[in-house]
Image: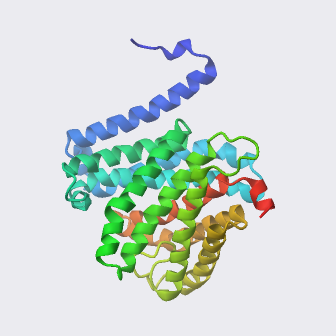
Amino acid sequence: MVIAADHFPREIKGAWTRNYAVLNFIWWTIYDFLQFGGELPVLTAYAVPTTVLWPNVTAVVFLAIGLLIIVPEVRQAQGLDKVLPFGRLFFAVPMAVFGADHFVFAQSIAPLVPRWIPAHLFWVYLVGVALFAAALSIIVKRYSKLAATLLGIMLFLFVVLMHIPGILAGPADRFAWAIGLRDLSFSGGAFALAGAQMKTRPGQGVPALVTIGRFFIGIAALFFGVEHFLHPYYVPGIPLDRLTPEWIPGRLFWAYAGGAVIFAAGAFLVANKNTRLAAICLGIIILLQVLFVYGPILAANLSSVDDGLNYFADTIAFSGAALLLADAWPRERDAHA
């Protein structure tokens, strides 16, 4: 059965057309990628590696869609609240990039799946599709509560099934802790978004999923903040295994000042004091680190997703998670804190 868009009212028709166009683009992009084994002739002629092209194209497409949707929300917001709509964008676009990574780096990701789980490549591709779907749903605000809930569960399972065993195998490996807490904070951001859309009765308090998100993000921020002081020459934000290039202006400033704000924000989140303001401050300081540290790194490594885009996406997703928590936290709860 074919449903003609002409039969719908103008508002529904417009939404139908936009969403269909987006889904149609994503479907044919994935189809073409699989059809040609990741190597499209027109792109090969320009010598653009697909491992570079597809994650970057994904980022640009999802960013463009997101900006078109959130601009009206930003205009309506007041004061610091103007930054909150960007939480959805900062969180969803990296998830889409990670989804693209699961297709172009499938062979490299498959060994990360626990040995006792069969069909490793199947799970890699399934997770890639799930990340794409969740990112699109969150950006366009269609079934976003379900998508965010499932995304939060999936990311939490990554922590339980992959990161915790890795940490237990090498508890002195600070990078294993950082990666595990990174995914835990992403799970917290997804849960905060899902919890914000749950109906609550007057006087019921903060939804449980939002509270879980507060703890997940707060605990990660405490660890990340301490790492800024212990290892100031490494990249800020999410302290992964990479030195901050010497040519980055004020790299120690972003380490020490950023670490102080991140640790303080984490402490306030865990203690549930001025939670909304703390989450906003956390999101903003991470965003500033992205703009002044990871932006130049990305510009200098456009030909390498591993050395450029993925670091950028990791860190801005943490900013997005914090802003999602701030948006989910009721104003009146901070007023009585």
Residue drawn at (51%, 26%), measured in percent from left and top? Answer: 17
Residue 19 horizontal/vertical position (percent): 49, 31
Q: Nearer the viewer, residue 127 or 9?
A: 127
Give the quarter of the figure containing the N terminus: top left
Viewed as shown, does residue 173 lie left or right of 40?
Answer: right
Residue 310 horizontal/vertical position (percent): 39, 63
Q: Is residue 3 visible?
A: yes
Q: Residue furthest front?
A: 204
Residue 194 horizontal/vertical position (percent): 56, 46
189, above or below 290, in the image: above
Viewed as shown, does residue 112 lie left or right of 164?
Answer: left
331, above or below 176, in the image: above
* Total tally of numbered discs in the picture: 0
Q: Nearer the viewer, residue 160 or 113?
A: 160
183, above or below 128, in the image: below
Give the quarter of the figure containing the C terminus: bottom right
Viewed as shown, does residue 8 lie left or right of 154?
Answer: right
Colour style of the rendered protein structure? rainbow
Q: Is residue 84 visible?
A: no
Residue drawn at (45%, 68%), measured in percent from left and top? Answer: 181
Q: Residue furthest right?
A: 335
Residue 105 horizontal/vertical position (percent): 26, 57
Say which quarter of the image contains residue 24: top left
Say which quarter of the image contains residue 221: bottom right
Residue drawn at (51%, 73%), measured in percent from left and top? Answer: 237
